[in-house]
Amino acid sequence: MSALSSAASLVPETAAPLVLALPKGRILAECGPLLQAAGIAPAADCLDEDSRRLRFETNDPQLDVVRVRPFDVATFVAFGAAQIGICGADVLMEFDYPEIYAPLDLRIGGCRVSIAEPVEQAMQDDPARWSQVRVATKYPNIARRHFAARGVHADIVHLNGAMELAPGLGLSRLIVDLVQTGSTLKANGLAEVEVIADVSSRLIVNRTALKTRPEEVSALISRFRHALAAGQSA
Ligand SMILES: Nc1ncnc2c1ncn2[C@@H]1O[C@H](COP(=O)(O)OP(=O)(O)OP(=O)(O)O)[C@@H](O)[C@H]1O
Ligand SMILES: O=P(O)(O)OC[C@H]1O[C@H](OP(=O)(O)OP(=O)(O)O)[C@H](O)[C@@H]1O
């Protein structure tokens, strides 16, 4: 062994900081108090959607935060680019990544994935009689699985937003989308006819990271668990 390589082997290896992936958009604001309760303080511009930065340091030198699109949180964590993340259960259901472990319901981002159709159509329609339907949705896998389980053949039209327009424009008979207050459906003349699943945001973890960096990852999960318990008792 050369002098150089034996000296190098004496230097302790510093692991790269863990990466926590947060979703841009409506859940981001709800993440703020939760992070604070967990003792995680990202750089001030992290929760500011106007900031063009995507990666932020935190008060813990061994933890960075990245801000990505909600659907991409699951992908970053599944591939181990981020070890931990916050993600809607809708996204987890859609991708069903085996690499992701979701230990905690964070009780934020509450809504549901539902089937909706035009109000006048809903008044005459009997969902029990559906045999073949065209469905517009941002959730093709959830929709396909749900209709298949009901024995209904679903032709899926995959959209990335504004699903509510689809029935009125003849693109589909039904939509599958998120509903919270119901005001978007109402404003577009649609009625919710079936709830597929209730949704809230989850803490998600890459299963490999849990094995390769067990102490750090488990400590982070514990911080969120305690933050939730403190929130409950407050
Ligand atoms: N109306 C809602 N009420 C509560 N939570 C919601 C609602 N809509 C979405 N969510 C939750 O917030 C997550 C992100 O939703 P948001 O609408 O901010 O992003 P998006 O529009 O899907 O993202 P993108 O900008 O990438 O298209 C969803 O995956 C879901 O878990
Ligand atoms: O029942 P409500 O309270 O009206 O919420 C439901 C709306 O919220 C989500 O859209 P979002 O505002 O996230 O916009 P999007 O079209 O980008 O998904 C969802 O896609 C619905 O359109």
Image (cartoon, grey):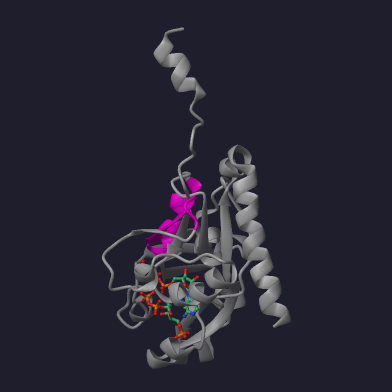
Residue 32 horizontal/vertical position (percent): 49, 74
* Residue 228 found in image quarter: bottom right
Residue 194 horizontal/vertical position (percent): 58, 79
Residue 136 vs residue 36: left or right? left
Residue 14 vs residue 227: left or right? left
Residue 74 vs residue 47: left or right? right
Magenta-drawn segment: 60-78
Q: Is residue 157 magenta?
A: no
Residue in view at x 57 percent, y 40 percent: 208
Residue 153 horizontal/vertical position (percent): 51, 62
Say if 27 sits above or below 74 in the image.
below
Residue in view at x 33 percent, y 80 percent: 165
Q: Is residue 71 magenta?
A: yes
Q: Nearer the viewer, residue 69 or 218?
A: 218
Q: Nearer the viewer, residue 202 or 10?
A: 10
Residue in view at x 54 percent, y 59 percent: 92
The quarter of the image holding the C terminus is bottom right
Please say whether residue 155 is visible from this viewpoint: no
Residue in view at x 60 percent, y 62 percent: 151
* Residue 166 found in image quarter: bottom left
Say if 181 sits above or below 51 in the image.
below
Q: Nearer the viewer, residue 207 or 178?
A: 207
Please say whether residue 95 is visible from this viewpoint: yes
Q: Point out the quarter of the image occupied by ligand 1.
A: bottom left
Residue 20 horizontal/vertical position (percent): 48, 56
Question: How many numbered discs, if any?
Answer: 0
Residue ranking furthest to the top: 1
